[in-house]
Image (cartoon, rainbow, N blue to C red):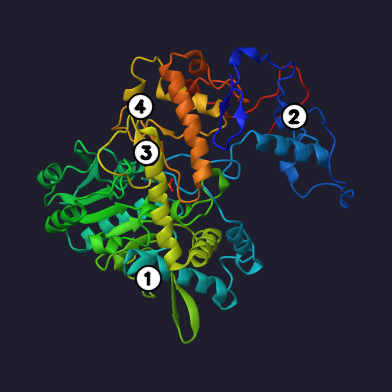
Amino acid sequence: MSTMNTVGRPTTPNRVESKPATLTGGRGLLQDEHLIFESDGWGKTGVDLPEPKTDGSDLGDLVRRDPIGLPGLSEPETMRHYVRLSQKNHAIDLAIYPLGSCTMKHNPRLNEKMARLPGFADIHPLQPTSTVQGALELMDTLAHWLKTLTGMPAVALSPKAGAHGELCGLMAIRAAHEASGQHERRRKVLVPTSAHGTNPATAAFVGYTVVEVAQTGDGRVDVADLAAKLGDDVAAIMVTNPNTCGLFERDILEISRLTHEAGAYFYCDGANFNAIVGRVRPGDLGVDAMHINLHKTFSTPHGGGGPGAGPVVLSEALAPFAPAPWVVHDADGYRLIEREEDEAAQAFGRLCAFQGQMGMYTRALSYMMSHGSDGLRQVAEDAVLNANYIKARLSDLMSPAFPEGPCMHEALFDDEWLKGTEVTTLDFAKAMIDEGFHPMTMYFPLVVHGAMLIEPTETESKQELDRFIHAMRALAEAAKAGDVDRFKGAPFHAPMKRLDETRAARSPVLRWTAPEGSNIAAE
Ligand SMILES: *Cc1c(COP(=O)(O)O)cnc(C)c1O
């Protein structure tokens, strides 16, 4: 049997049962790889160091008694170990990464080159500011563009992730309520049911009681429920826009009006800012604080790819409470406002020891400047177009969670269409791995049953999208045709087969121990 794939080449579907397992665990030029501690080169080293000149030790009692227990590897063995491991990883440089609520699928090489310039990469946070004027100018320029793009008067650059930005925003809100003597009364934070888990977690961490706000049938904040819950005991609301269902909050102006009327602040979770950048300024919507995940909107690497950065833009009302440090400039050049005796008298404190993630700042500004303002607007337009293309091409086979109207930057399906097939969202995602595709986000947002959240972003071409859609359609048809075996034990072709995810989460093995009777010992 042969079908045509999206680029017109004939493909022969592989029958799972026709594939014998290999004898070694290797597969198609990829060797099975063991832990580095399981290599048997103990005592070997890849570098030739001169004998230490001193005998004896300056460490007194602290001198090591047991072997250090580091594996011995030559340079080629070390290289191969890590390259083999890297081949087990999926990467955005290999294929579409359809995770939703996650964004960046591409980290332009230009950004990487800029971030590695010694003037940005090799500086120390304690250097005199006169020697890092360029770096401070870069931070100031980035701050300028973040404020311009959001229509907000202030920004705190230092938070190191979206969740850290939420903490920054809620601490500024708490400081503002303390300053006006309302903190004791305002103990609640309202959060919609569809919110990302970090929202209620942050509110609770800052000491607030989290109150859930209902969602309407079409996936938006239930304004009547919000209005009923707002009052003089509410400190803030936290609303994601576009929200985690991939939808623009239609009533956002009404939401901010009601919030301010109740004397509360409007925290916007800006993780999805890439869907509206250059088109909508959150400041115009009445937002008081919003984090921007640079690793989701401005192309800096995400997750294992590097540290994130979550600058928080702040309204006039919250700006005085922004955490130190921040950059200012005058005729004498750029300097950092660090201490209360400077201009930071009302700052709620600081969020990290130094100035934040310089490498992320450099990458984000490089991305902004290489796109220009017209390019950034097109980012949002193309991200939304691509998501709607996927929604349109899959909606006859799969069930969109909110079929009415277009979506924003993510296409969301539920598992209604899998009813009666015995295939679950998890099975479907695992079978995608066998077809060469990283799964989409599963089971999030929680308000959608068996959710499958797909976010292509602007960086995927139509050809890549068609390739993805082709695989999704083929799998969907297989599920509906009763080809259950293809799904139940999947993945069959990945280095790791189906894992016991509950056990992996509940009792992870975090420490390697030497096998009984071996003379090797790990740290
Ligand atoms: C990713 C995300 C966050 C958290 O951001 P991190 O940078 O991962 O800490 C918060 N809210 C939403 C909607 C997100 O998608």
Instruction: Tell me how many marks there are.
Output: 4
Task: Note whether 268 is above or below 136 in the view shown.
Answer: above
The numbered mark, 4 or 1, whose residue comes first in the sequence reads 1
Q: How crowded is mark 1: few (under 14 residues within 10 Å), some or many (20 or more)?
A: few
Query: Which label lies toward us, 3 or 4?
Result: 3
- Residue at mark 4: 450
Q: What element carries label 3?
A: helix
Residue at image location 76% in from the left, 26% down from the top: 520
Cβ–Cβ below 8 Å for labels 4 and 2? no
Q: Is the Cβ of the residue at disc 1 closer than 8 Å to that at disc 2?
A: no
N-term mark: 3 or 2: 2
Q: Does the residue labelled 3 lie within 8 Å of ligand 1?
A: no
Q: Please state which amino acid type lies under the numbered disc 3.
A: Lys
Q: How far apart are marks 4 and 1 (CA)?
A: 50 Å
Drawn side of residue 94 relative to residue 345, left or right:
right
Residue at screen point 48% across, 16% down:
488
Residue 91: x and y in percent read 59, 41
Residue at mark 3 to residue at mark 2: CA–CA distance: 37 Å
Which residue type carries mark 4?
Answer: Gly
Q: Helix, strand, or loop for circle 2?
A: loop
Q: How far apart are marks 3 and 4 (CA)?
A: 17 Å
Q: Quadrant of residue 411?
A: top left
Disc 3 marks which residue? 391
Give the Cα distance between marks 1 and 2: 61 Å
Q: Which residue bears the numbered disc 1?
A: 340
